[in-house]
Every structure is written in structure tokens, then in C-alpha cells.
Amino acid sequence: MPYEWITPDDPAPRSAPVAELHLWPYRSLPRRDFVTFIAATAAMVLLPLLAVMGSPVLWGLLPFFVLAVGGIWYALQRNQRDGEILEELRIWPDRITLDHHHPRHGHHTWEANPYWVQLKLDPRHDRIKNYLTLKGSDREVELGAFLSEDERAVLYDEVDQAIRDAL
């Protein structure tokens, strides 16, 4: 699953959280395979152009080839940037924080007392099945919006247990 629990080796320092969770979106195309995919796409699109090599028709089709490969390159680059989302949930006995880092929407922070935090999983939400939220300090924030519905259900149990263990 695209998240990882980090437990401190020595929980003695007051400044270290009792539990820390890092969440990120699933990446189906790693950065190292990006060049291979673009090269294969360019080769497949260029293959039909070999039949018109040396004729004026090539110059008429070449701009469309460049637009197609450029469009795929742009879409994949934007997908890579959007996939750099990182959520960090830190739990201490006296507070809980959620830091949401998004490449285009900036950085957002939420903080509350874990004793008063309500963790909710709404299986019948209007738009998203298994909608996972944290509510505290008069504010409700979504946790793991990019996770699948099954992953959010499993994460609910794990975060609930981590909050109970911290108290």
C-alpha cells in the first residue's frame, strides 16, 4: 500500500511523535520508465511516417507527430508532479498533526488534541466510498483522498489503533 508507518526507535524524547504515518499516491509509471515509454511511443508514431519519407507529405504530417508526442510528454509530466503529494500524520499523546504537501496547491497543516479527535469512515458518502476524515479543533480534514476504498478501510483501523495507543 502507498503508505508507511514510522515508529521511533526510542520513544523517550518528548519532541518525537509516538507514531508517524506517511501517505502518497500509487505510482504506476516510475520516473525511470518515463523515458522508455516516450521513446517507444515516438517510435510507434514515427513508424507510419517511414512510408512517406522524402515526400512533401512528411512535412504535412510531422507537426501532428510532434503535437502527439509532446502532448503525451506533457500529460505524463503533469501526472508525475501531481503524484508528488505527501501527507504526514504525526501523533503525540497531547496533539495530532496532519501536514498535506501538494506540488500545485501548496502546504496545509491541521492540528488537534487526539483526545477530542473523531476519526470517521463514511462507507456511503455521496462521491467517495469509504470517505476517511479526521475531525477536531472545529475543522474536518480528509485523510488519504488518493487511496483506494479498500486501502482507506484498512487505514481507518490502523489510525484508530495508533490514536488509542498514544492516549
Image: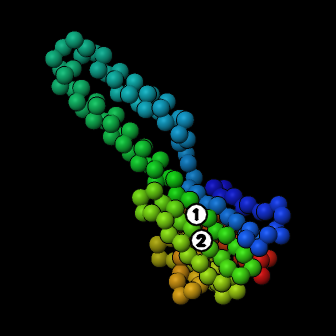
Q: Position of residue 47 (x, y in %)?
A: 35, 21
Residue 106 sits in which quadrant?
bottom left
For the C terminus, give its image quadrant.
bottom right
At a point 83% along the width and 64% down the height, the residue shown is 10
Q: Secondary structure at mark 2?
A: strand
Residue type at mark 2? Leu
Residue 43 vertical placement versus 91 (above, below): above
Q: Is residue 161 visible?
A: no
Q: Position of residue 16 (x, y in %)?
A: 74, 68
Q: Secondary structure at mark 1?
A: strand
At a point 73% along the width and 71% down the height, the residue shown is 15
Residue type at mark 1? Glu
Q: Is residue 146 visible?
A: yes
Q: Position of residue 109 (x, y in %)?
A: 54, 72
For the N terminus, give its image quadrant.
bottom right
Q: Can you tell which mark lies on residue 98?
A: 2
Residue 151 vertical placement versus 122 (above, below): above
The reply to whether callout 2 and callout 1 are in contact (CB within 8 Å) is yes
Q: Is residue 57 left or right of residue 88?
A: left
Question: Which residue was labeled with disc 1?
Answer: 87
Residue 92 vertical placement versus 77 (above, below): below
Q: Position of residue 29 (x, y in %)?
A: 53, 42
Q: How many marks?
A: 2
